[in-house]
Image (cartoon, rainbow, N blue to C red):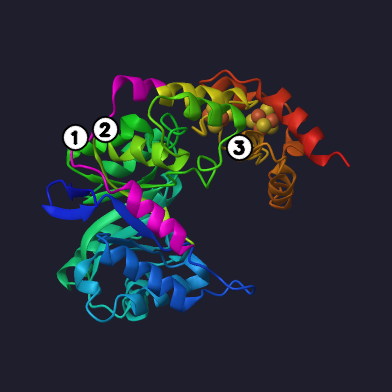
Amino acid sequence: MLKTTFPTLNLESSALGFGCMRFPTDADGKIIEDEAIRMVHHAIDNGVTYIDTAYPYHGGNSELVVGKALKDGYREKVILATKLPMWKVEKHEDMMAILDEQLEKLQVDCIDFYLLHAMNAERLELARKLDYKKFLAEALAQGKIKYPAFSFHDNYDAFMAILNDYDWKMCQVQMNILDDNNQATLKGIEAAREKGVGVVVMEPLRGGLLANPPADVVKLYESWPTRRTAVDWAFRYLYTMPGVVTILSGMSTMEQVVDNLRIFDVPQGEALTDEDKQLYVQVKDTYMACTKTRCTGCKYCQPCPMGVKIPSIFQGYDTSLMRADGSFKKGYAKISAEEADASRCVGCGKCERACPQNLPIIRYLKEIHAECTAE
Ligand code: SF4
Ligand code: SF4
């Protein structure tokens, strides 16, 4: 197992982290506990030392199962990370009450990395208003957490605002072959590295999209002199990236655990060749060639005065094109149910003036709406 270190903490970790949001489930969606625990144990027995869960995963049951999996000496072998659901916090006292509930569910006295979950610009304001720094100081003083951290979904500006707001010990961001210019961006990861804040990566396979590439991408991988699976290439992109400490993989089967262990069984210090870097450029270009809007999700067009969720619509639509399964109708219906679909657009043009990509947003919205609502 490839080993890495969290900078400034002198804390060794495995480069592969076990994400506990996609445990195997039965027909009713209940976690198959025996199998989930067997998978976690197999990963730890073979060198995985980073376990990531969160309050809402599996309807609140992931933390319970992780607590069971970490009995019998396994807790001492791992770095344990879980997250404070910021959307449930209404007043200052809620933060400690939730943390206490999590400690009980996990059956531990202390959580190593405690993350403010899914932080964005709006939640930073809320966290400040509720004095999150006082809460973290108390949790640290009481020995309930070791390292304050945050997970993140927003744009680069929001990432920098959060990164610079506190003495974080780690940040968890979305990064993969397609997202170098999205969310925190490569620039954000570099900024975290410069500050000595270790980066944990989520969505390394972009929700499975990179594990099942379209035919043109398959052709590219097959034509390359070094033969590797698409998943192998996707993980390699990340574990060779400066600043990245651990990469989370949400594993659902023992087969995936075994495959990931094989992929991360590489020599220390392995780097990408110039040819490999070229391959990633071609892979990204090939994926992007399938898309329509090329929206980067930067959110500079938000908020729309009519509440249209432009980035969600564009990115959902593009992803469905890359998957070539026409699956966005369902996603679009969900956005409509939230009263945030394109039919609400009144053509004021505010979004187009703000878009750094100069996208013809109003036209794209009309076209996507027509396609997604056609019988
Ligand atoms: S043009 Fe439409 S989508 Fe854009 S800001 Fe105005 S109402 Fe919102
Ligand atoms: S439409 Fe433009 S401004 Fe809005 S998220 Fe996409 S790229 Fe950014």
Is mark 3 in CB contact (under 8 Å) with mark 2? no
Q: Residues within 10 Å of mark 2 (few under 14, many from 20)?
A: some
Q: Residues within 10 Å of mark 3 (few under 14, many from 20)?
A: many
Could you say whether the residue bearing mark 3 is in a helix, strand or loop?
helix
How far separated are the C-alphas under marks 1 and 3? 32 Å
Q: Residue furthest right?
A: 375
Amino acid identity at mark 3: Thr
Amino acid identity at mark 2: Glu
How many marks the image carries: the answer is 3
How far separated are the C-alphas under marks 2 and 1? 6 Å
Please report the residue visible at 62 percent of the width from the left and 40 percent of the height from the top: 316
Q: Nearer the viewer, residue 238 or 35?
A: 35
Q: Residue tagged by mark 3?
A: 319
Please report the residue visible at 42 percent of the width from the left and 60 percent of the height from the top: 86
Looking at the image, residue 335 lies above or below residue 76: above
Q: Nearer the viewer, residue 124 or 362?
A: 362
- Quarter holding ligand 2: top right
Q: Nearer the viewer, residue 294 or 291?
A: 291
Using residue 156 as the reference point, say whether residue 211 is left or right of it.
right
Q: Residue tagged by mark 1?
A: 194
Find residue 270 and report its horizontal and vertical position in percent: 22, 35
Q: Which numbered disc flags the more N-terminal residue, 1 or 3?
A: 1
Looking at the image, residue 91 lies above or below residue 180: below
Q: Is residue 258 located in the magenta-colored stretch of the structure?
A: yes
Using residue 83 as the reference point, say whether residue 140 is left or right of it.
left
Looking at the image, residue 211 lies above or below residue 279: below
Q: Which residues are magenta?
A: 253-278
In this rendering, does residue 77 appear at all? yes
Residue 215 numbered mark, or none: none
| Mark 3 vs mark 2: in front | 3
Q: Residue tagged by mark 2?
A: 190
